[in-house]
Structure formats: C-alpha cells, structure tokens
Image (spheres, grey):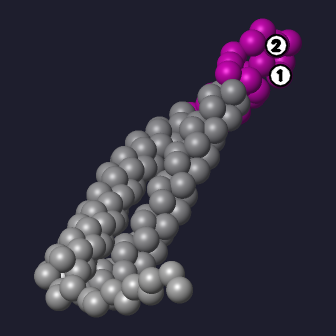
C-alpha cells in the first residue's frame, strides 16, 4: 500500500486536474451557448431580409441584393450549425472528462480513507499487544 504522503500528493494532483477539467468544461459550455446565440442572430437577420413588396423601379435591384444577402446568410447559418455541433461535441467530451477526473479523485480519497482506517486499526492492535504498564496507586494517607 502507498504511503500517506504519496497518496496526499496524488490527491493534490488529481484535485488540480479536476479543476482544470472543470474549467475546460465551463469554456466548452460557454462556446456552445455563444454558437447557439450566433445561430439565433443569423436566423433573425435572414427573417429580416425576407421578400417584401416594394415599389416597381427599385424592386428588381433590391430583390437581387436581398437574394444575395439571404444566400450569404444561409451559408453563414450552415457554418454556424456546424460550429454548434462541434461545440456540443466538445462539451460532451468535456463532461465525460470531468466525470472521469471526479472518479479518479474520489478513488484516491477512498484510498486515503482506507489507509487511515488501517493505521487506526494497527495502532489499536499495537496498544492491545503492548505489555501492561504498572499503575502507581497511592492510598489515602
């Protein structure tokens, strides 16, 4: 069994790793939220340039410009959807990494608790096996 100092050092390392993994998970969730917000803004812009009735002379030019803008927004929406999927996959991996880091940390904590319990039992057995000490009793004078 490992020494208590070694287990404590391992626990410190696992705790630091858990903190780093949790920070990465938070960044991944922030990225996902940011990509979802961007996708929503693009959808709002696309809805804003939907065809609407306009005066006849300007209608042709404005329809061409709006169609071009809608096409660009559609491409941006597809790219945003891909980035959102990638961010969600990264967030899922980060959640799994956090779960594994917690599992590792709790395993080390259990090892430390088991080592402490073993040390207590060993100390009790040593006290039971120790020769009795002579008690000095003073009678009342």
Contact flag, marks 2 and 1 (Cβ < 8 Å): yes
Q: x, y (%) of residue 6?
A: 29, 87
Of the pair 1 and 134, the residue shown nearer to us: 134
Q: x, y (%) of residue 112?
A: 30, 72
Quarter assignment of residue 119: bottom left
Image: 58 above or below 122: above
Please indicate, yes or no, whether residue 51 appears anywhere in the rendered image. yes
Of the pair 125 and 32, the residue shown nearer to us: 125
> Which residue of the protein is positioned furthest toward the front in this rendering?
141
On screen, residue 58 versus residue 97, left or right, reads right
Q: Which residue is mark 1?
A: 58
Of the pair 34 and 103, the residue shown nearer to us: 103
The N terminus: image quadrant: bottom left
On screen, residue 42 versus residue 1, left or right, reads right
Image point (78%, 9%), residue name: 53
Question: What stretch of residues is rendered in magenta?
Answer: 47-71
């Amino acid at each position: 069994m490992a020494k208590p100092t070694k287990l404590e050092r391992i626990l410190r390392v696992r705790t630091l790793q858990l903190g780093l993994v949790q920070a990465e998970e938070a960044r991944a969730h922030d990225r996902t939220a940011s990509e979802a917000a961007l996708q929503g803004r693009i959808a709002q812009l696309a809805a804003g340039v939907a065809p609407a009735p306009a005066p006849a002379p300007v209608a042709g030019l404005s329809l061409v410009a709006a169609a071009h803008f809608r096409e660009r927004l559609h491409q941006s929406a597809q790219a945003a959807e891909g980035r959102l999927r990638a961010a969600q996959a990264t967030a899922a991996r980060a959640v799994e990494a956090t779960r594994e880091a917690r599992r590792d940390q709790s395993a080390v904590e259990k090892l430390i608790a088991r080592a402490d319990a073993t040390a207590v039992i060993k100390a009790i057995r040593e006290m039971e096996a120790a020769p009795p000490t002579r008690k000095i009793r003073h009678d009342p004078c």
